[in-house]
Amino acid sequence: MSFYDLREYMKACEDAGEMITIDQEVDWNLEAGAISRRICEVGAPMAHMTNIRGVDYGASILGSPMSKGWQSDFARIAIGLGLDPSSDYEVLMNEFMQRMAHPIRPLQVTEGPCKQNILTGKDINLFKLPAPYLHEGDGGRYIDTFGVTATKDPDSDWVNWGVYRHMIHNKATMGGIVNPHQHIGMIYYQRYEARDKPMPYAIFFGGCPTTAMIGSMSPPAGVSEAEVAGGLRREPLHLVKCETNDLLVPATAEIVIEGHVRPYERWDEGPFGEATGYRASPRMPRPVFRVDCITHRDNPIMPISCAGTDLDECEILYGVFSNTSAAKRELEAAGLPVINAYSPPGLKFALLIVAVEKGHMGIADRVVSVIRGTKLGVRFQYIMVVENDVEATNLTEALHAAMTRTHPTRGLQIFGLAPAHPLVPFLDLHDKMHARGAAITFDATSPHESGANGSAQTRTSFRGAFPEALQNQILESWESGYGLPTSPGRFG
Ligand SMILES: Cc1cc2nc3c(=O)[nH]c(=O)nc-3n(C[C@H](O)[C@H](O)[C@H](O)COP(=O)(O)O)c2cc1C
């Protein structure tokens, strides 16, 4: 099943017990943020807050649209892909990988619901939209926490989509963090600012949920994310041209903000409660997003993500699914014997666990060299390489391997200088400004010389220490024969 717009996705979530509606008045000042944050932490249904104090246009807020789910951690991701909400991580990851490998070109249409209201000139007032003040201590009201920003490379057909935060400065300007390692940063700093040209942009909210999914993920530079979002949807997106620039946005978007970013213009933005679980990047001068036009549907719905310590949209989409799929893609492309890769939820995309085939000498170094040499290099401060007797998706097994197989001096490789994401909490200001950090590899592969035929390194677990036929027999009889209960699923 593919969704026409955010509203159809909301209906499917409501039917599955993954959305509730709050009709009582909710304050944009901290209350909407606090509700959304707690949803992420306890794994509650997302909340459609229909009565937000002081907003105009009959607008409402959708809190935590793809955070930790109610039935399972990834229930709303599964629904967004048209799958059963109980689908587990492996099923979802395979769907992401397969569908992303089959992009579908969008169709350009001439009109759509996102054009129901068109605001230009003095009618532009960002404060009339539901822009929450999310966490105590944030530098301002964040109008964009789950919108998709479209920008175009002026030298090719490439249009990038990415989810990047934006804070309101005044009625018609916003500020955002434009990281140089992100595609928007490459396009803005290298293709527009370096040539002293303004960069057109369009930020859209809503539309088919696969658009926000792909905006949070990172296909390689040059790949059309509109096509990949179509692939995820398994049907073409319908895109419509903006009013004031040539960018295309989903015709069913709830709200579209069009504008431009001037070269070298910087105003103070932040701080913001970020997805690392801290307010780690300081208030500082950042690019200014000037607004030329706002278009919106009648009674527009603003999806918001209240980032923080536990399973918000950034952690799930960017941390778990984007980082893991990109790591697998890069490692497979390099021809390494990779079985699986996993960035465990809850650890703020700091750790990547890679499971490789047993018996390849020096494999941990090769894995780490590949990852650190790509755009992914800034993401993982910790990379743990385990062998295929360990399930990469089982954090307890991976930690057991690291604590028992990683030699404290020979197995730990410390990189005193490594590329880093500027939001990494332990970096000092100087490091943040230069995106320079440090990293560690845990080589939890078995040393070749250990034990006769590696027997000293065989895990004495149910899967490691018993014949496969016996394991299968026991699993079959577990409930029906022995009457033992089945333990709850890892993500249940
Ligand atoms: C809710 C949410 C908020 C995000 N906020 C930011 C942000 O403010 N800045 C940023 O660089 N990346 C942010 N990300 C991560 C990017 O969306 C992600 O890295 C994406 O791949 C960027 O697209 P790109 O690879 O085309 O640059 C966020 C992701 C999510 C899901």
Image (cartoon, rainbow, N blue to C red):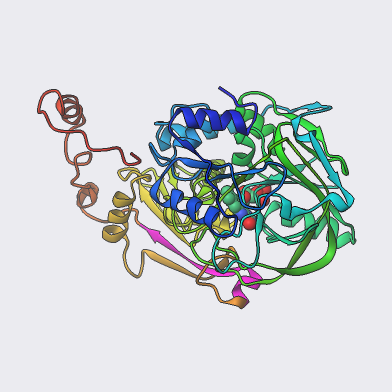
- What segment carries the magenta color? 430-443
- Give the residue at the far left of this rendering: 482
Q: Is residue 186 left or right of residue 165?
A: right
User: What residue is drawn where x is 75% and y is 53%?
Assistant: 126
Q: Is residue 374 visible?
A: no
| Foreground pick, 105 / 213 | 213
Where the C terminus falls, by quadrant? top left
User: What residue is drawn where x is 67% and y is 43%?
Assistant: 59
Residue 128 x, y percent position in the rendering = 73, 51
Is residue 68 a member of the stretch shown in magenta? no
Residue 466 x, y percent position in the rendering = 16, 36
User: What residue is drawn where x is 43% and y is 57%?
Assistant: 347
Q: Quadrant of residue 298?
A: top right
| Foreground pick, 305 / 326 | 305
Where the N terminus falls, by quadrant? top right
| Foreground pick, 388 / 7 | 7
Q: Is residue 479 left or right of residue 397?
A: left
Residue 338 x, y percent position in the rendering = 45, 43
Instruction: Tell me if residue 347 comes above or below residue 249 in the rendering.
Output: below
Q: Number of marks in the image?
A: 0
Instruction: Tell me if residue 179 comes above or below residue 108 in the rendering.
Output: below
